[in-house]
Image (spheres, grey):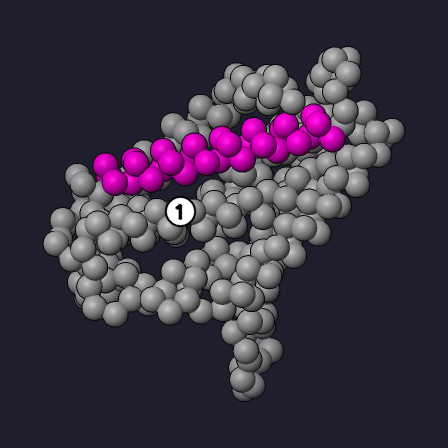
Amino acid sequence: MLALIRSEWERLWCRKLTWLLFGLIPVMTIAGARYMKGEHAHLSPDKPQYAVFHNFPVLALAEMLITAVNLILILWLIVSMTQEYRTGQLRMVMLRSYSPVAIFSAKWLTVIAALFLYLAVFFMVSYITGWFLLPKTESLTLFYHPGTATGWEAFWYNLQYYGMAFITLIVMSSIIMCIAVASPTSTTAIGISLGFVLVSFGYIHILQMFTMNYPVHPKWYYLSLVQIQYEGITLLLAVKPMLGKWISMVLATYGGVFMGTSWLLVRRQDRFM
């Protein structure tokens, strides 16, 4: 299994797509920093949305998580799974007597490892970008935290935020993997995956539209994985965490259902191999 994972890791880095996605990190962070700096005229410095050196890693990822990072995850998984199967590349791997479950597990673990590395690089580049482009303050305000925080407290908060974001992306990967192994073409897989993200985002607006005159429990909003990525992480990292059990249950349900479905689909060797 380790040899298979090593092989998949090498294949991942042989693709120009991987190098391109990592190369875009400085572009994304610089663009984000310049945009947020322009918003300073409309924000008070005591607002958590006010971008400074110490909180820029969180604000940068929050801007990119539900759009760019989800798209990156979709591309990596679709190219690794659906495209390789449809082009016949997996048949060469099967000649080495690896089971379908082992092959797809190795591919999934490889993408997850690459995603972890991507977030780590994004984290470091965000700090570097913030150092050069944003104000440096002795204290700042964090989401759902009373008073102000020091730079070291912000650093610990940033690490926790990235950790929670990584967990949501693992759950998202289980959904995309299920779509990837079930789709007849890469185009179909990408379309359905993007559709899922858009529906998850649109669900919030539809719910608000139909419940304008009725009180709705916040739990309903956090049935959406995208909403958990967008606002749920900050709720979990509040001084008094909110909806922790509910969000954890939703994430576990998404991950369990779609990972289990993917496993069942991959077991059908006559369909995939």
In this figure, which residue is indicated by the disc labeled 1? 162
Q: Is residue 236 above or below residue 152?
A: below
- For label 1, the crowd category at 10 Å Cα-Cα, with few meaning under 14, some 14 to 19 and many 20 or more, is many
The stretch drawn in magenta includes residue 115: yes
> What secondary structure predominates along the stretch shown in magenta?
helix
In percent of width and height, residue 108 lies at 61, 33
Q: Is residue 262 above or below residue 109?
A: below
Q: Nearer the viewer, residue 204 or 57?
A: 57
User: What residue is shown at x 63% (from left), y 19% (from top)?
Assistant: 4
Q: In which quadrant of the rendered view does residue 219 lie? A: bottom right
Q: In which quadrant of the rendered view does residue 123 lie? A: top left
Q: Is residue 38 visible?
A: no
Give the magenta part as a residue range: 101-129
Q: Is residue 262 left or right of residue 217?
A: right
The stretch drawn in magenta includes residue 195: no
Q: Is residue 262 above or below residue 41?
A: above
Q: Nearer the viewer, residue 196 or 55?
A: 55
Total numbered labels: 1
Q: Nearer the viewer, residue 132 or 34?
A: 132
Q: Quadrant of the C terminus?
A: top right
Query: Which residue appears farthest toward the bottom when viewing the image?
Result: 213
Q: Is residue 131 above or below residue 248?
A: above
In percent of width and height, residue 134 lies at 18, 47
Q: Nearer the viewer, residue 57 or 105?
A: 105
Q: Is residue 84 left or right of residue 142?
A: right
User: What residue is shown at x 31% (from left), y 46% (from top)?
Assistant: 57
User: What residue is shown at x 19% (from left), y 51% (from top)?
Assistant: 151
In percent of width and height, residue 139 lies at 16, 57
Q: Is residue 103 left or right of residue 11?
A: right
User: What residue is shown at x 65% (from left), y 22% (from top)?
Assistant: 1
Q: Give the amino acid at mark 1.
A: Tyr
In percent of width and height, residue 106 lies at 63, 27
